[in-house]
Image: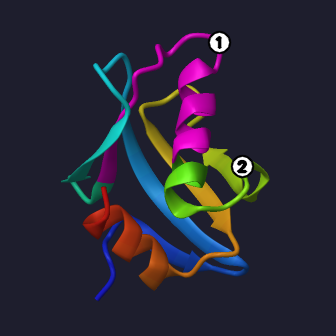
């Protein structure tokens, strides 16, 4: 069974993310209320947190940054991301198991 924050879509997956900006460091905290909670070191100013989030997810999943797009929640703490070229099982294994 896959995580509630992870959905398979054509060409990749969609992640539902809850962001906590201005954390001491950027890291995945775990699942919170059916969403993937991620702490970001970047402040929520001028899109900095969004850019940091996309970069962090791309690096974590080992895909080029251009394959990660923000599809909803531009100014919200609750965001939806689309990651192309990966499957749900691989994403869940990396996010849930890896450092």
Magenta-drawn stretch contains 64: no
What secondary structure is found at the residue carrying circle 2?
A: helix
- Residue that extends furthest to the right in the rendered view of this protein: 66
Q: Quadrant of residue 41?
A: top left
Up-down relation of residue 72 to residue 39 (above or below): below
Task: Answer above or below: position of 7 versus 50.
Answer: below
Foreground residue, 5 or 98? 98
Q: Residues within 10 Å of mark 2 (few under 14, many from 20)?
A: some
- In this view, 69 is above or below 1: above
Extent of the magenta region: 36-56
Q: Residue at position x 65%, y 12% from top?
A: 46
Q: Give coordinates of residue 12: x percent, y percent.
A: 65, 75
Q: Residue at x 56, y 81 (%)?
A: 87
Q: Residue 45: percent from the left, percent from the top?
A: 56, 10
Q: How many numbered markers are drawn?
A: 2
Tell me whether circle 1 and circle 2 mark residues in contact (CB < 8 Å).
no
Foreground mark, 1 or 2, reads 2
- Which quadrant, please, contains the N terminus? bottom left
Q: Which disc, if any, is residue 65?
A: 2
Q: Spot the residue most to the bottom.
A: 1
């Amino acid at each position: 069974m896959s995580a509630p924050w992870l959905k398979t879509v054509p060409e990749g997956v969609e992640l539902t993310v809850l962001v906590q900006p201005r954390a001491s460091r950027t890291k995945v905290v775990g699942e919170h209320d059916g969403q993937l909670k991620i702490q970001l070191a970047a402040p929520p100013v001028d899109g900095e947190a969004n850019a940091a989030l996309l970069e962090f997810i791309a690096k974590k999943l080992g895909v080029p940054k251009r394959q990660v797009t923000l599809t909803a929640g531009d100014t919200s703490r609750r965001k939806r991301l689309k990651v192309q070229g990966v499957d749900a099982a691989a994403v869940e294994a990396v996010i849930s198991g890896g450092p």
